[in-house]
Image (cartoon, helix red, strand yellow):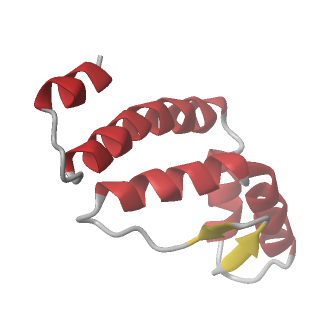
Amino acid sequence: RRILSGLLLKALCPTRWSSRFDSIRAIKHRQGDIIELLKELAAAGGPNRVPAGLLDRVKSFEFTVMLVIWERILQKVQVTNNMLQTKNLDLSACAASLK
């Protein structure tokens, strides 16, 4: 784990959608720092080519576009999830938040 300006990069929890939103948001907002870290790891060399391969993917336009799309989708899920957990549940409001 590495703390970057208040956003923690951490392992993804496969069962919690709110965890996915937090992870995607952290990656999106710290993409530059992640690229710099991968550059350092790739420059260190060694038999492991994983950092260089990840660096190519993280720097790609496709990766950035997917981060933006995923963040928007998961943000809607996050809002709806929070609404569904309130005591005064209003299903029509939850449905409207997804539009």
Image quarter in which the N terminus is found: bottom right
Residue 41, image x, y percentages: 79, 74
In this rendering, does residue 10 appear at all? yes
- Nearest the eye: 17 or 89: 89
Residue at horizontal 44 percent and vertical 51 percent from the top: 21
Q: Please say if 15 is above or below 61.
A: below
Residue at horizontal 57 percent and vertical 29 percent from the top: 65
Q: Quadrant of residue 8?
A: bottom right
Farthest residue in the top direction?
A: 99
Residue 39, image x, y percentages: 83, 63
In this rendering, does residue 98 appear at all? no
- Nearest the eye: 57 or 33: 33
Left or right, 94 with reference to 73:
left
Q: Quadrant of residue 94?
A: top left
Q: Please say if 28 is above or below 52.
A: above
- Nearest the eye: 82 or 99: 82
- Nearest the eye: 34 or 74: 74
Residue 48, image x, y percentages: 65, 78
Residue at horizontal 71 percent and vertical 61 percent from the top: 52
Residue 4, image x, y percentages: 76, 68
Image quarter in which the C terminus is found: top left
Q: How many marks?
A: 0
Farthest residue in the front direction?
A: 88
Left or right, 63 with reference to 6:
left
Residue at horizontal 63 percent and vertical 58 percent from the top: 54
Q: Please say if 76 is above or below 3.
A: above
